[in-house]
Amino acid sequence: QVRLVESGGGSVEAGGSLKLSCSASGGTYRRYCLGWFRQPPGKQREGREGVAALYPGDGTIYYRDSVKGRFTISEDNAKNTLYLEMHNLKPEDSGMYSCGTSGGTCRVDSMDYWGSGTLVNISS
């Protein structure tokens, strides 16, 4: 059973930066896809949206259009840790950020394991 624990969230002003971490333990972490998702304020968990995805097999990376050029997803395989570096943060980036792993594609409805999330709040 894989356990994922996120950290690094917090409250910053618009234009600031945060680096999120997702530490994995307990099983095969490095599955087909590793992803970061966020649940915007006021939305249910089903309303989570994909932010960034990494396919370790071939290094393919995808970003949500609104975060391209500002967010960077990366991993440290030796530490079993996935990262999301976020710069030039905007109020609309606020939300509960969760990481997940999937044996298939990184979609909200196809993830096998989820962390409980770390809260990001961006003030204007």
Image (spheres, rainbow, N blue to C red):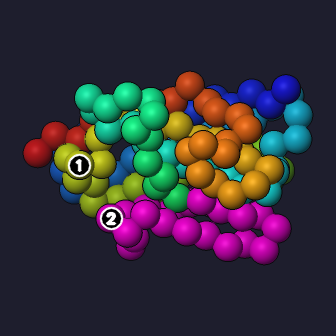
Residue 26 appears left or right of 55: right
Crowd tier of the residue under label 2, counting other residues whose Cα lies within 10 Å: few below 14, some 14–19, many 20 or above = few
Seen from the viewer's position, the closer of residues 26 and 1 is: 1
Circle 2 sits on which residue? Answer: 66
Amino acid under disc 2:
Ser
Residue 47 to residue 107: above or below = above
> Which residue is located at x 61 percent, y 30 percent?
115
Crowd tier of the residue under label 1, counting other residues whose Cα lies within 10 Å: few below 14, some 14–19, many 20 or above = some
Residue 70 visible in this rendered orientation of the protein: no
Do the residues bearing badges 1 and 2 touch, measured as CB atoms within 8 Å? yes
Residue 22: x percent and y percent?
Answer: 62, 39
Seen from the viewer's position, the closer of residues 70 and 47 is: 47
> Which residue is located at x 53 percent, y 37 percent?
98
Highlighted range, magenta:
53-75
Residue 33 appears left or right of 73: right
In the picture, the disc for residue 92 is 1
Residue 32: x percent and y percent?
Answer: 79, 57
Residue 32 visible in this rendered orientation of the protein: yes
